[in-house]
Image (spheres, rainbow, N blue to C red):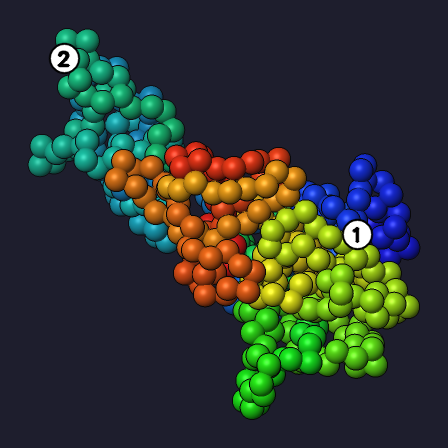
Amino acid sequence: MTHAETLAGVVSSLADFDPHALPVALARDAIERFITPIDSLELVPLRRALDRVLARDVISPIDVPAHDNAAMDGWAVRYADLDADSPKAFEQIGTALAGKPFAGRVTTNQTVRIMTGAVMPAGCDTVVIQELVATDGQRIIIPPRQKSDQHPGQHPDQQQGQHRRLRGEDLSAGKPALSAGRLLGPTELGLLASLGIAEIPVQRRLRVAFFSTGDELRSIGEPLDPGCVYDSNRFTLIGMLTRLGVELIDLGVVPDSPQALEAAVRDASRQADAIVSSGGVSVGEADYTRDIMNRLGEVAFWTIAMRPGRPMAFGRIGQASYFGLPGNPVAVMITFLFFVRDALIRQSGATPRPVLPVPVRSTMAIRKKAGRTEYQRAIAQIGDDGVLQARLTGSQGSGVLRSMSEANCLLVLRHDQGDIASGDRVDAMLFDGLI
């Protein structure tokens, strides 16, 4: 998608798109289609590349491994020298260690002691593991190629090429090693190190501005006047955004006034690639918010068919994507997890890795209204019968952040699903990997 494409154009291509009763799947689809990945790279040392997004394809400059080598400790032999069905004596002519290859060449009925990772000696094509080999004091006794018909099970099969890693079987020189858009984890760092790559091109970190709105909000350290509450949403967002590896721009608490909101949004759009706000998007609050946002950019106000987290705004202010989340603390977390998280990963230039649902057995009856997706806070654990089961944490009110802290998963009750009976299977999204 290009910046020339409008949100209205994206929405018009989605069948049955109703902003007043929008299914979760359609909202996610619209956001995915509208988001544009950044393309601004920088070179970083490999040791600082963890959780960064690879900006360009990496082509392997070498073969990995660079030589045929042993996958196990044992004895390197020529497979053709093994007897068909009886053990056979071989002459040991040397040793091959990792980093210290055997310099000679193996000929008929000769063997080399070899350690894991050592280069295969010239002439050898097979490794027989040390546990199967015997000695008569001078010679090495190696099992036959196949089990003896006279003594079934006495000798294990030996296969040609066994326990040998071939040159380039992991990566071949000139072949793609990693594709652009890969989020670099520990495995990828090790792979790049195996190629001898010291610096890697990554996307610059996505800049995300965020703020809370509300006259009743106070920042930590300020006196708590009657009717006021401390702003928890910004700190929840700090935690979730930090986990995404973005650059944070904290704009604090914005009062409920058109002038203050417009100034904050203008400021955010000049600094950031994405803007996340909490509060000010419900039906009663959104009157002037809608006017401001549509004057500054293109923003749609949706009522998502979900619980918690029905009101949401989404669009673009200048070049920045905009996510207007509800004000209730749990609703902020849920809407972030299921709408904002993947969108920011995609905008960072990466492909989101799906967080797969896990089937669990509900230990209690749950009332559920068909026609909306519900996310219920729950605790999953292994039952006495070994089956993963889950129970709700208690009150599911969207302002009860404590119950989110006590939970280790969310039960995802599908759009078309009705009441859940005790013992029914439901989908759970485990917090490990999600939050």
User: Measured from the top left, where is residue 188 in percent x and y?
Assistant: 53, 54
Please identify the quarter of the rendering in which residue 3 is found: bottom right
Residue lying furthest top: 150
The nearer-to-camera label among 1 and 2 is: 1
Q: CA distance from mark 1 to mark 2?
A: 70 Å
Most foreground residue, 148 or 274 = 274
User: Measured from the top left, where is residue 57 in percent x and y?
Assistant: 67, 51
85 relative position to 210: left or right: left
> Label 1's element?
helix
User: Measured from the top left, where is residue 69 in percent x and y?
Assistant: 39, 41
Q: Which mark is residue 151?
A: 2
User: Measured from the top left, where is residue 276 in percent x and y?
Assistant: 70, 67
Q: Check disc 1 and give the amino acid type.
A: Phe
7 relative position to 197: left or right: right
Residue placed at 51% from the left, 42% from the top?
367
Residue placed at 56% from the left, 69% from the top?
236
192 relative position to 149: left or right: right
140 vs 255: above or below: above
- Ranked by sequence position, the earlier of labels 1 and 2 is 1
Q: Which mark is residue 34?
A: 1
Residue placed at 42% from the left, 50% from the top?
392
